[in-house]
Amino acid sequence: MNKTYTLQEIAVLLGAKVQGDPNCVITGIGSLEHAKPGEISFLENPNLRPLLNDTGASAIILKEQYATFANKNYLIVENPYLGYSKVSVLFNDTPKVEVGIHQTAIIGKDCEIDETASIAPLCVLGNRVKIGASVRIEAGSIIGDECEIGADSRLCANVTLYHKIKMGQRCLIHSGVVLGSDGFGNANDKGVWHKVYQLGKVVIGNDVEIGANTTVDRGAIDDTIIEDGVRLDNQIQVGHNVIIGAHTAIAGCVGIAGSAKIGKYCMIGGGVGINGHIEIADGVIVTGASAVGKSITKAGVYSSGFSAVPHRTWWRILARVMSLEDLVNRVSNLENKHEHT
Amino acid sequence: MNKTYTLQEIAVLLGAKVQGDPNCVITGIGSLEHAKPGEISFLENPNLRPLLNDTGASAIILKEQYATFANKNYLIVENPYLGYSKVSVLFNDTPKVEVGIHQTAIIGKDCEIDETASIAPLCVLGNRVKIGASVRIEAGSIIGDECEIGADSRLCANVTLYHKIKMGQRCLIHSGVVLGSDGFGNANDKGVWHKVYQLGKVVIGNDVEIGANTTVDRGAIDDTIIEDGVRLDNQIQVGHNVIIGAHTAIAGCVGIAGSAKIGKYCMIGGGVGINGHIEIADGVIVTGASAVGKSITKAGVYSSGFSAVPHRTWWRILARVMSLEDLVNRVSNLENKHEHT
Amino acid sequence: MNKTYTLQEIAVLLGAKVQGDPNCVITGIGSLEHAKPGEISFLENPNLRPLLNDTGASAIILKEQYATFANKNYLIVENPYLGYSKVSVLFNDTPKVEVGIHQTAIIGKDCEIDETASIAPLCVLGNRVKIGASVRIEAGSIIGDECEIGADSRLCANVTLYHKIKMGQRCLIHSGVVLGSDGFGNANDKGVWHKVYQLGKVVIGNDVEIGANTTVDRGAIDDTIIEDGVRLDNQIQVGHNVIIGAHTAIAGCVGIAGSAKIGKYCMIGGGVGINGHIEIADGVIVTGASAVGKSITKAGVYSSGFSAVPHRTWWRILARVMSLEDLVNRVSNLENKHEHT
């Protein structure tokens, strides 16, 4: 924190072209709307162009075509949002933690904890847990027997891992996440449910981020798998034996039923429901508030959501939809009359 | 607990008119259906009027028009549900807690904790945390560096606050809530996601209640803001840089995407999805199971939900909806024939 | 773990007919696709029949009609999934825990804890809590005053119970579950919300399983009730005063608004929303991604979900639906012209 950079230094990091003063000192990041002198901002959304006139930012990351004021400092890049993401690393103020195992943490038998890892107060590790280099386990997190956490991964406070979860390197797991709870397996015998014990694991690749209060069930027999580079937002439910392909991003409140297989490089919008035992191809985009009932075999954009309109309008539309059968019959009658005239 | 009140005492609290015996002793609250002698009940929903005949309640809070039995005790008010809410305070049996810091709590450096606050067992406070008068932090809650909790606020068990969360007075935060997790910021570079570090805060006003397992992400650059008097139910996801206006109430399972701005005095029904970067005006009501894809600029009631019907009926309707294009063409054909006849 | 069974032993457990070698030794369970020698598999989904040819499994649980290879070992049953569930018990590898109260657990006053129960590290029990025989409370779980947990129930790590929760025997409560948070009760007075204190309890029957991060609110006055044998998946929200009938199963991400009453032997699909103050009859099935706005009085299957189609197709359909009124008018015009010709 309180680090400063010259615009030139940031330009080198971003591979950007400087237009303006390369010696301008940057002390932080600000939004176009609220940036103060010393702060760098960015323009990604063209609708926000008018803010360029008035922003208090000392420099702006943007595409060449928008760098139109002679007296402003610009960093010109092809992908301003990517440029901004790289600058955000410089000013990241997530608190540092102390290396080592806090005296109030409870550690099971035969664990292998790298000496560069930090285990915060009141964490509980089961037996035979393996913790890689520079891993950071924050307060109150609980890790079951035989879990493995790869180097440089971070578990935020109050994360829960059941037994035998395998996690790669550089993962970031937010608070309230539960990994490895039982899948929803129930066999029915004359109306009464018998539990199917869940014997699989959860296997998470490298560079995966999982948002707050998201849950990932362990597999029934085979494993639930989240591949490299996947980004899961908050409050997502991932059922047992789901496979999420590499570099897929899934927004908040999505529910994925058991054994669904989602391809690589997909983007799933907020609140989407995905049926069990279906496959979604690589490169599929599903817009928010849709439901995916059947497999999707081709890349492309898919939707099924309605957007709210005034209640009375909706009420009339609903009535029309529910009586569509009747309208179809009326049209058929008219067609018949035409044939006979 | 075990306090009792005369009907007269409660009438004064409510500003109600007593019809019947003002000395009637009230020992608790009961529903119209299950109330026992000594208990006070209320009638809000007119559909429940028939229960007035048979209820075991010793007194009933209701509107004047329903106070029709000469031998019953009534508290007559204009807003019976509001009256009931005030009586519920009297009989609130939430367990009391001891003032002070439990010996198993872990407190960071340079915290300012009011001596009337209570910090329960196994809480963890980071550095430079400020805790106001009579604040109550229940067991297992974890509070990051530089958080500020205003007077009389209560964090229930197992709440997680990341760093730099600002909370006003008299807030009630339920178990499993996560405040300040990273917003879902990812910049794409040839298919691979780069994390956008989230530098904003979460700022919560006075008199806010947040339900169990709800998550509120910190802002990307500016803050995520929840204004005074907001009520959030359980399992809600609030994305980064969302602003929720004062006195808005949001029911369970709602998802609010990043940078959405919701007005004051709104009511959002259960399971609603709200798109990112849109604005909802003051005084908007969205009915349950709807999705809000675009900005709503006028107060009023908005909907887009369908309600379940028998599966075969729905199947036929779906088929008709999916082939509406065809129906429109058939109508156009008929119209053309008419013009040419 | 590492137990083995002969096929004959398993056949006795399942009441199955052995076809093949009854002395075949079974060392674990495998899916048809990935089973290795020594493992037993099952065929439930007829679509997976082709896998029977190539599976590495040493034995397969299936219906008689599929037991067609002379050289394979089969356990023939009527309900293969039920058979598999019984075998899953044999190979359940959930870690064992030590009986007794861990020294870091915090126990309130006047608790009654059976000596066969296990209370893990860093649990917190309030006052007057009753814990039955062989109950297992895992690390970091917090239990409020006057809760009662019946024999053989298991609370996984980081579960939170508010005060006065009653739970039956053999329940399984997954991590992140919150039971007994306040229902969403708010009385409005000129735009400002007044809290309705929630005085009811949560009462849970025997043999109930509740999935990770599911929340169940306490009743406002009467109790929220989950009857025997209910199965709740992850991320479900159960509002105050909801009643869920015995042996009902509810999939992930379902939201149930306050005072809804769901019958016995129902199945509710993933992501369904259920309105408050309605009743759903016994034996109702609601398919995923539907909303239930009104009471359902008859057993049967109910739906209201749309499934995603290519975005352009959906866009055209949406436009047609939103202008249905216009189409109906055009048909009426045609009908009028016909009458007058």
Image (cartoon, coloured by chain):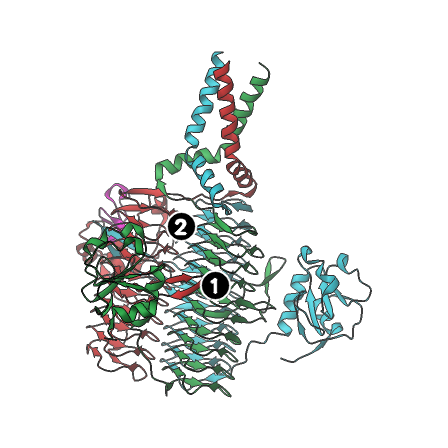
Chain colours: A cyan, B green, C red
> Mark 1 against mark 2, which lies toward the viewer?
1
Q: Residue furthest top?
A: A341
Q: Is mark 1 on a helix, strand or loop?
A: loop
x and y, in percent, of residue A131 in the image:
45, 76
Question: What amino acid type should be assigned to the residue bearing mark 2?
Answer: Gly
Q: In this view, does B269 lie above or below B310?
A: below
Q: Is residue B138 left or right of residue A317?
A: left
| Neighbour tally class for label 1: few under 14, some 14-19, many 20 plus, Cα within 10 Å | many
**In the image shown, does C307 or C63 lie closer to the viewer?**
C307
The chain ID associated with circle 1 is B
Residue C73 is covered by the magenta coloring: yes
x and y, in percent, of residue B140 in the image:
38, 77
| Neighbour tally class for label 2: few under 14, some 14-19, many 20 plus, Cα within 10 Å | many
Task: Report which residue position mark 2 lands on.
Answer: A276
> What separation in Å lies between label 1 and label 2 (alpha carbons)?
39 Å
**In the image shown, does B150 or A172 lie closer to the viewer?**
B150
The chain ID associated with circle 2 is A
Write the start and end of the magenta stretch as one range. Answer: C61-83
x and y, in percent, of residue A293 in the image:
43, 45
x and y, in percent, of residue B85 in the image:
34, 65
Instruction: Assign the N terminus of chain A to one quadrant of the image.
Output: bottom right
Task: Confirm whether residue C182 shows in the render.
Answer: no
Task: Confirm whether residue A218 shows in the render.
Answer: yes
**In the image shown, does C248 or A16 lie closer to the viewer?**
C248
Contact (Cβ within 8 Å) of mark 1 with mark 2:
no
Q: Which mark is residue B247?
A: 1
Q: Is residue A248 left or right of residue A62?
A: left
Residue A260 is covered by the magenta coloring: no
Question: What amino acid type should be assigned to the residue bearing mark 1?
Answer: His
Q: In this view, does C289 lie above or below B217?
A: above
**In the image shown, does A34 or B90 lie closer to the viewer?**
B90
